Amino acid sequence: MSLFNKKILITLILIASSCSSIDSFRQSYTNLLSSSDKSYIVQPGDSIWSIAIKYNLDSEQLIKNNNLKKPYIIYPNQELFISKVQGQNKFQEKSQSIEWHHPLGSKSNLAIKEDAWLIFKESIGVPIHSINLGKVVVSGPDIPGYGNLVMISHPDGYLSLYAHCDKIFVEQGDEVTKGARIAQLGNSEAAYPMLRFQLRKNGQPLRAEVLNSLFN
């Protein structure tokens, strides 16, 4: 048994001795686990953004946790310390109070709800627009599985994702306005032409039902 595991075992024994019931001990054990730091070992092809998306993390918090400097380069086998930002109770209400621009410029009846994604089936070449002003943080096939991807960081911790694009008209670092044309709909790494869209707040994706209501 490693020294770290021994320390955890001793801590748990001390906690157990002070607990009046098994339920109290179980809760203390859960709290101990949730308070401990977690780490991730960088794999080949990883980026800050791919890790943030995969584990529903706030990319800004991930950068701060590891004191990363621009352009936020990471390396295989590098250890990153990760922690999730607690969701905000008023997230849904705050999101709905913002006037978002539809990603296709107009309401579409072809949206499919898939967990935290909206999938719009349209023809190749249909213009894709930024839902709000912001800064482009990803532009291109940087994250496997999303094809040509555009990610835009918006004020107040929001992040929008536009996957499987055809042509992309913005580059990383560009400042975009609300409604700006950023790409064309395509089928890169997709079975058919589509826009796969998601909106996140502090790393946490909105549910598809809530997301769809923003454009109604």
Image (cartoon, rainbow, N blue to C red):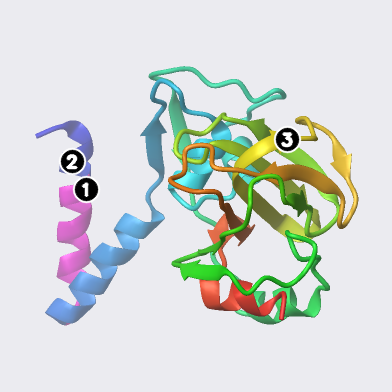
Write the start and end of the magenta stretch as one range. Answer: 8-20
Asked whether, in this view, residue 28 is left or right of residue 163, the answer is: left
Q: Quadrant of residue 155?
A: bottom right
Label 2 close to label 1 by CB (< 8 Å): yes
Residue 74 on image: x %, y %: 54, 21
Q: Which mark is residue 54?
A: none
Gap between marks 2 and 1 measured at Cα: 5 Å
Tell me the element at label 1: helix
Circle 1 is placed at which residue position? 8
Image-quadrant location for residue 38? top left
Q: Earlier in the sequence, mark 2 or mark 3?
A: 2
Q: Is residue 14 magenta?
A: yes
Q: Which residue was labeled with disc 3?
A: 168
Q: Residue furthest right?
A: 177
Q: Relative to 142, is 139 on the left or the right?
A: right
Q: Which residue is mark 2?
A: 5
Tag nearer the camera, 1 or 3: 3
For the stretch drawn in magenta, the main secondary structure is helix
Q: Amino acid at mark 2?
A: Asn
Mark 1 or mark 3, earlier in chain: 1
Q: Nearer the viewer, residue 186 or 145?
A: 186
Q: Amino acid at mark 3?
A: Ile
- What x and y, as percent, mark residue 59? 60, 43
Task: Say which residue appears at 51% left-offset and 46% top-offset.
Answer: 53
